[in-house]
Image (cartoon, rainbow, N blue to C red):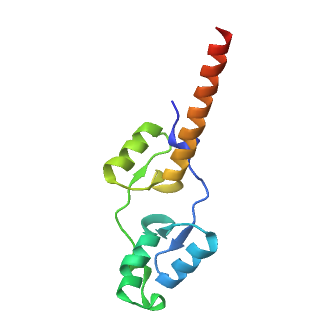
Amino acid sequence: MVQVRDIMQKNVITIEYNKTALEAAQLISKKGISFLVIVKDGKPIGVVTEKDFLLKITSEDKQASKIPLKDIMSYKFRWVEPSTDIEDAVQKMLNNNIRRLLVLENENLVGVITQTDLVGFLRSRLLIEGTVENILSDES
């Protein structure tokens, strides 16, 4: 059985909770990513996504350099452990209508798993299974 640890991204970009929305937006832009994990004392306390910037700053014509990150971040985030089965992670994402899960071990951030990671994994699995089926049918 494949587990989250087998396909998770281990290099997660984080930012301290006391930064501004502008600093977070600049980091997202520089790294070419769609979200950041917000940390305090090295522990994840929330996330901020591109959607947060759109809904909480741009649509209200606010100045990002004057907005504390804590005012736009989402404090509720979903997470799984590295040993979680992929199927359970997918179900959690579907049940909560989310695109990413943080991966925590003993309350420490060790990775993240996204829809993109899952699609890549499933695509590879389907290609491998299809190849095996073709080989077996050729041998018959």
User: Residue 54 at x, y = what percent?
Assistant: 41, 77
User: Residue 26 at x, y = what percent?
Assistant: 57, 80
Q: In which quarter of the image is residue 140?
A: top right
Looking at this view, name the residue that lies furthest to the left.
Answer: 95
Which one is nearer the viewer's eye here, 130 or 66?
130
Residue placed at 38% from the left, 60% from the top?
77
Residue placed at 36% from the left, 48% from the top?
94
Above or below, 62 against 87 in this view is below
User: Residue 119 at x, y = what percent?
Assistant: 52, 46
Above or below, 55 against 37 in this view is below
* Res. 87 in view: yes
* Res. 113 in view: no
| Left or right: residue 135 compared with residue 114 | right
User: Residue 80 at x, y = what percent?
Assistant: 43, 48
| Left or right: residue 17 compared with residue 137 | left
Above or below, 67 against 117 in this view is below
